[in-house]
Amino acid sequence: MNFCGTCGQKVELLTPAGDHLPRHVCTACGTVHYHNPKIIVGCVPEWEDGRVLMCKRAIEPRLGLWTFPAGFMELGETSGEGAARETLEEAGAQVEIGDLFAVFNVPYVSQVFMLHRGRMLSAHHHPTAESSETVLMREDEIPWDKIAFPTIYHGLKFYFEDRRLGVKGFHSMDLTMRRKPPEPSGDAPVAA
């Protein structure tokens, strides 16, 4: 960052009084510009027969791999509203958002991932600019070796385990190390 978003003057990297980290500070108006983690919101949309809606990514990163609908939360919306919007944008599906069931801290990409349960309002879904394919899948049909991100892999595992146990648990996980995903090779899960 070179210039202040408030007044347009040059900023300097300084540690403000009472702070513990360097921040971009405007030397003209005093505005402190914080850079904070991004919040990612999503849901596991379930149809009435127990299948869940999966999307094959038509965009980078991880083009061609599988995910459930998720993306960056927008200003002015709740995590549930964002998850519903992402489901419509990525899969053309409308959902009723349920409870929050997983939070993932992913500091190596400065993200916090919030995952909701979701109930599809109809079986309608379709590919979009973000998804080349959308498919309702049983757990045994999930392409575990072609999952786009560790948050998606672990979120699905938590979801199906809760469903098997007949509970609505809450899960939290810190994914603190970036690991190179394995090459797709059959049944190997994507590493965290």
Image: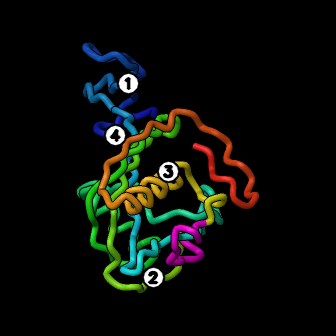
Q: Mark 3 points at which residue?
A: 154
> What residue lies at 65% left-to-right and 66% top-to-bottom?
64
Residue that label 1 marks: 23
- Rendered-image quadrant of the N terminus: top left
Residue for point 35% across, 77% down: 120
Q: Which amino acid does label 2 sit on?
A: His
Judging depth in this view, the residue of 98 and 163 nearest the camera is 163
Q: Residues within 10 Å of mark 3 (few under 14, many from 20)?
A: some
Q: Nearer the viewer, mark 2 or mark 3?
A: 3
Identity, as a three-letter code, of the amino acid under mark 4: Gly
Q: Mark 4 points at which residue?
A: 5
Instruction: Give the quadrant of residue 19.
Output: top left
The amino acid beneath tag 1 is Arg
Label 3 secondary element: helix
Instruction: Give the residue at mark 2.
Output: 125
Q: Which of marks 1 and 3 is in front?
A: 3
Asked if disc 2 and disc 4 are in contact, CB closer than 8 Å, the reply is no
